[in-house]
Image (cartoon, rainbow, N blue to C red):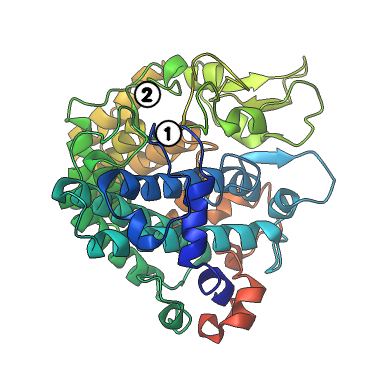
Amino acid sequence: MKTSFENITVLLFTLFILNSCEEFLDVEVPKNEIDQELVFSDDRMALSALTNTYSKIRDQGFFAGNKVGIGYLLGCYTDELEVTNPQESSYLRFYKNSVLSDNTAVISLWSNTYNQIYLVNNVLEGIEKSKTISPEVQDQLKGEALALRAILNFYLTQTFGDIPYILSTDYRVNTKIGKQSVNEVVVQAVEDLLVAEQLVSPAYPSSEKVRINRSVVEGFLARMYLYQNNWDKAQYYAEKLINSGTYMLEPIGTTFLKESKSAIWQLKPEAEGRNTIEAGEYQFESTPSPFARLSTKLLGDFEQGDLRKQFWVRFVGDDKVDACAFKYKQKGISSPSREYSIIMRIEEMYLIAAEAAAHKGSWQDFNRYVNAIRERAGLALLDIDNHTDALNAVKKERRVELFCEYGHRFYDLKRWKNFDELFDVKPQWQQHYQVLPLPEKELLLNPNLLPQNTGY
């Protein structure tokens, strides 16, 4: 913990900004050496600081589209991906469920995410002190920063269990903060989101869906309330987005295009003409797969005629064994960019609303939402009026709708207490695997993080 906070100074923060020369949000980043006061001296400079934070979130930590991002790692950890490369790697360790506290991916997830939280808190402190940022921009940037802090802490606690919820850039304070329970972290994250909801604009603050607006905040409120078993609020916020008229269920074949009407929040590539990292990381062209392939179990969970299997799965070779995730298709350069990474989309809101309705026994709502997803996939409609069948239907739809997207499968199995579903492909699975170990070096530096998670 000490290295995650103490060594990240305001100087490094400004250097991060100086080194960001990409076209992430079409905002020119200052090149000269500046201090924190100058960073937040006007609207454009303050936006540059937040822009840098978005780019760090895209490139490192949970939302990275590479093999040390949470989508790939937890796909290997559960039953979405089968690793075929025997060479030692972090993702092989995840696949074998032999993750230890010195695993480089574990260290990277933890340290990069807390570094991002530091940057977010620096933005919050900087705009709070500034007397020259316009009120409208100040509100928008504060709301975005609060939302980012909530989202990052939410992923941390769902992955590592009890964690510190850092609210300051002061390392003297941060290195003395102990862990908070998962419930406490989620409660604090919801509080940050509720404040953000009142600050951010309903419209996207940039020309694309790459910055946080009110819909993004409400989408994460829907998800967090679902995780808290608060069915009324989960359905309420999910329905706000469904009924907004802004987002629509996209045909399966165009769901992951840059202009997708179902996308709620996207991450923009570092330069115009580039596309997602995911396309290059998940796809392969020859057999056997050089890294990992979609699991036989996942492929078997698609119903006959499911368009999602037709459009989002690509078989390589003639044996119909080696298949890759094909949600993102455009590898490399195109003119213009064709695909952005999608963190949240409206289909998830339909599934949240359906699951919440099932728990409430609102069968008309349940069938309407789950059938909207199934009809789009070319599947027969359901008519369910009991709790067990409804939840099983939602679980199956989430399985084949959200595969290889930022760890949904792992987090779903965890909140449903359904890790027994892994036993046929992960016979070595143990209960304590539902959280990752805390990085050993952080425990040595900050005893307030003790004890280590059970089993590690």
**Corner quadrant of residue 390:** top left
Mark sitting on residue 374: 2
Mark sitting on residue 56: none
The residue tagged with tag 1: helix, strand or loop?
Answer: helix
Q: Quadrant of the N terminus?
A: bottom right
Q: Amino acid at mark 2?
A: Arg
Q: CA distance from mark 2 to mark 1?
A: 8 Å
Q: Residue at x 37, y 49 (%)?
A: 50
Q: Position of residue 219 (x, y in %)?
A: 28, 43
**Corner quadrant of residue 373:** top left
Residues under numbered marks 2 and 1 in contact, where contact means CB atoms less than 8 Å apart: yes
Q: Position of residue 386 (x, y in %)?
A: 28, 41
Vertical comparison of 91 with 207: above or below: below
Q: Position of residue 357 (x, y in %)?
A: 23, 43
Q: Which residue is mark 1?
A: 397
Q: Is residue 453 visible?
A: no
Residue 106 or 182: which is nearer the viewer? 106
Q: Position of residue 168 (x, y in %)?
A: 36, 71
Q: Label 2 crowding class (10 Å Cα cut-off): few <14, some 14-19, many 20+?
A: some
